[in-house]
């Protein structure tokens, strides 16, 4: 038996919208149930959370309807109250909050799009003559320094300030069973470099126009949902299309750019679902964004990329956010609990931009302690001049920087260049975030290939530790180009130390951590001596090592002419070529002879390592 909760609001033209003669005072704690502010919020809409899914709220003169299609979750307790024109929304909120059974009354806040610097396509740039073998024929790949940076594209760029993607691609390039929701401006679904990797709702694509063919509560949602307009017509947006391309532009199609998890050109790229929360100059209200997040969870997304956030002054700490966050954070929690990839990851992973305000804390929702939040790194390991940093920031990735010219921004798909479906350059934490989302998608693709299974917490922890140290570069000053004034201000890098998250993401290291395979980093053309005590224990110097097993193929690919050796617990190896390769270090636990037969002795043991050789490596393993 459903419980009926009724509140009457008259239609007389009274500022408060409360019927004349109704002197019922709100309950003493009613005001505490109201979150947010009417300023900048929808003028005729309130979001109400009931204390039970069985409650029915009826308000005379107002429309009350469920916020979401019911599916038995806690989000079913939310309803949307559409008030009559001319109502005093604050007075209405107070009255509704005073009703028994009402848990929260929230003003539906308006979310504006984040500002991003668009650099356009450079008029000129260095020839793509870098000495590395690229696995795909996309002509812009050599200019995507954020994937592989050898320092040759600019005198200010530093080798290794990238996500080490070429080495990761040797293990996987994506999997079309992985779906990433891009909660942003709409993706240009027909883009030549995106079309084959778009998520497609086949029932709607092959069904009847104007009909909910798959029964998911949304009509004609072929590639996702336009939350601004409330329909399935996803419209092309420059920002959303750029973000999508970094995650999964189609690889090896001889056109434009590559995506991190864009596949091999054989229909095996990660799928992109467009959840549109910006359309032209229009943004969304809280309830529309919450709807989009739940849509992504209910329709197969495992990862959600969020290159958006509230203004830096909206919330200053987690306690304040928890008090006022309302339905958006509940939808975020819903995604984490109900999205995922069957058999691979239980729960959904949400990744956010830290913001471009140069302040020493991350914007919310990204800054909240359970949300992964991404800061931006320049092409030389220093912080991008615009990035937010400090509390709330969890990890960083390349996001581009104007100091080094447009060529050192992030290159990805575009709706405006090269006949409307080419590529362009942007920089911002909006661009850094899809690098982490793309790496996560690549990680799930590899987990599918290997048959691995994780909880979302386990996978997130591996993601956040698949990084290299950035703090070693947080010293001195650097200048940046202020495009508004045409000047070159300077800032101190020291203030960013220990405030850029765990470090900068490495796609290859992520895959190796999923494999539980340690990576050993060596500099090419230098004999490296690497301690093995971390892997064989503090007594490694006294263990009897029986040699290193290495294939001729690995020797050739890394330019190894002398078989590596182990002496005193130290591995000695020299690589003359950049690349990766597996070796096995063999040892005996407890003796110098393996027991068996007529022998009493020790136990044979071995550890497998991934050798990663690049141009230069810091003493602590980070790229220089």
Image (cartoon, rainbow, N blue to C red):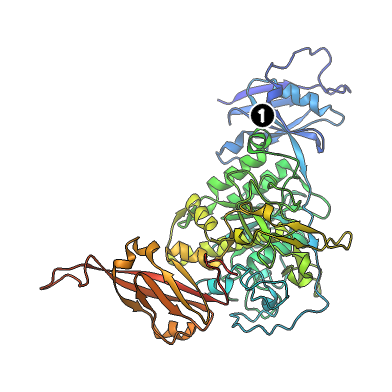
Return the residue found at the far left.
Answer: 598
Let me know if residue 187 appears in the view.
no
- Compared to 244, does 60 lie above or below? above
- Compared to 201, does 49 lie above or below? above
* Residue receiving disc 1: 104
The residue lying toward the viewer, choosing from 521 and 6, is 521
Q: Quadrant of residue 423?
A: bottom right
Q: Quadrant of residue 73?
A: top right
Let me know if residue 350 appears in the view.
yes
Judged left or right of residue 621, residue 43 is right
Judged left or right of residue 535, residue 28 is right
How far across and down, in percent of the image, does residue 597 sit? 12, 73
Query: Split into 4 quadrants, where in the image is the N terminus?
Result: top right
How far across and down, in percent of the image, does residue 404 sit? 76, 69
- Compared to 621, does 310 lie above or below? above
Judged left or right of residue 124, residue 570 is left
How far across and down, in percent of the image, does residue 383 sit? 69, 59
> Disc 1 on helix, strand or loop?
strand
- Compared to 580, does 384 lie above or below? above
Q: Quadrant of residue 45?
A: top right
Judged left or right of residue 98, residue 53 is left
Query: Split into 4 quadrants, where in the image is the C terminus?
Result: bottom right
């Amino acid at each position: 038996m459903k419980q009926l909760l009724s509140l009457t609001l008259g239609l007389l033209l009274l500022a408060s919208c409360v019927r004349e003669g109704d002197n019922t005072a709100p309950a003493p704690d009613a005001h505490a149930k109201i979150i947010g502010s009417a300023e900048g919020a929808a003028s005729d809409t309130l979001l109400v959370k009931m204390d039970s899914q069985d409650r029915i709220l009826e308000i005379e003169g107002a429309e009350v309807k469920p916020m979401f299609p019911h599916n038995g979750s806690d989000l079913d307790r939310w309803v949307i109250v559409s008030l009559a024109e001319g109502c005093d929304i604050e007075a209405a909120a107070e009255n509704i909050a005073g009703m028994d059974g009402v848990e929260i009354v929230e003003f539906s806040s308006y979310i504006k799009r984040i500002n991003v610097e668009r650099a356009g396509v450079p008029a000129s740039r260095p020839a793509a003559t870098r000495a590395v073998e690229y696995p795909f024929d996309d002509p812009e790949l050599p200019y995507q320094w954020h994937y592989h940076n050898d320092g040759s594209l600019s005198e200010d760029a530093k080798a290794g300030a990238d996500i080490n993607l070429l080495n990761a691609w040797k293990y996987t390039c994506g999997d079309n069973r992985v779906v990433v929701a891009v909660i942003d401006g709409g993706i240009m679904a027909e883009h030549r470099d995106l079309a084959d990797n778009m998520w497609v709702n086949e029932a709607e694509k092959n069904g009847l126009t104007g009909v909910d063919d798959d029964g998911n509560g949304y009509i004609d949602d072929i590639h996702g949902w336009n939350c601004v307009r409330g329909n399935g017509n996803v419209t092309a947006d420059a920002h959303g299309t750029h973000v999508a391309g970094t995650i999964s532009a189609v690889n090896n199609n001889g056109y434009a750019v590559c995506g991190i998890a864009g596949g091999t050109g054989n229909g095996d790229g990660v799928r992109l679902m467009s959840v549109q929360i910006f359309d032209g100059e229009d943004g969304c209200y809280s309830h529309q964004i919450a709807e989009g997040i739940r849509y992504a969870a209910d329709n197969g997304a495992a990862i959600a990329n969020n290159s958006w956030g509230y203004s830096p002054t909206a919330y200053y700490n987690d306690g304040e956010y928890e008090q006022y966050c309302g339905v958006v954070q509940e939808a975020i929690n819903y995604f984490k609990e109900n999205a995922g990839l069957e058999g691979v990851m239980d729960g959904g992973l949400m990744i956010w931009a830290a913001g471009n305000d140069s302040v020493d804390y991350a914007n919310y929702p990204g800054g909240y302690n359970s949300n992964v939040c991404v800061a931006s790194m320049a092409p030389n390991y220093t912080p991008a001049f615009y990035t937010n940093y400090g509390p709330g920031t969890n990890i960083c990735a390349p996001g581009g920087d104007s100091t080094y010219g447009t060529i050192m921004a992030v290159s990805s798909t575009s709706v405006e260049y090269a006949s409307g479906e080419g590529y362009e350059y942007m920089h911002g934490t909006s661009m850094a975030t899809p690098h982490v989302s793309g790496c996560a998608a690549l990680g799930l693709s590899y987990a599918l290939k290997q048959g691995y299974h994780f909880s979302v917490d386990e996978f997130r922890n591996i993601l956040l530790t698949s990084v290299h140290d950035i703090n070693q570069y947080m010293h001195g000053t650097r200048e940046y180009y202020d495009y508004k004034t045409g000047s070159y201000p300077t800032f101190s890098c020291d203030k960013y130390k220990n405030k850029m998250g765990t470090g900068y993401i490495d796609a290859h290291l992520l895959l190796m951590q999923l494999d539980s395979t340690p990576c050993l980093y060596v500099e090419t053309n230098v004999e490296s001596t690497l301690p093995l005590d971390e892997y064989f224990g503090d007594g490694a110097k006294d263990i009897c090592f029986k040699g290193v097993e290495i294939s001729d193929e690995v020797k050739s690919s890394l330019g190894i002419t002398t078989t590596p050796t182990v002496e005193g617990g130290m591995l000695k190896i020299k690589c003359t070529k950049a690349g990766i390769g597996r070796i096995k270090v063999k040892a005996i636990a407890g003796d110098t002879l393996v027991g068996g037969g007529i022998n009493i002795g020790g136990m044979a043991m071995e550890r497998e390592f991934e050798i990663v050789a690049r141009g230069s490596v810091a003493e602590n393993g980070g790229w220089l």
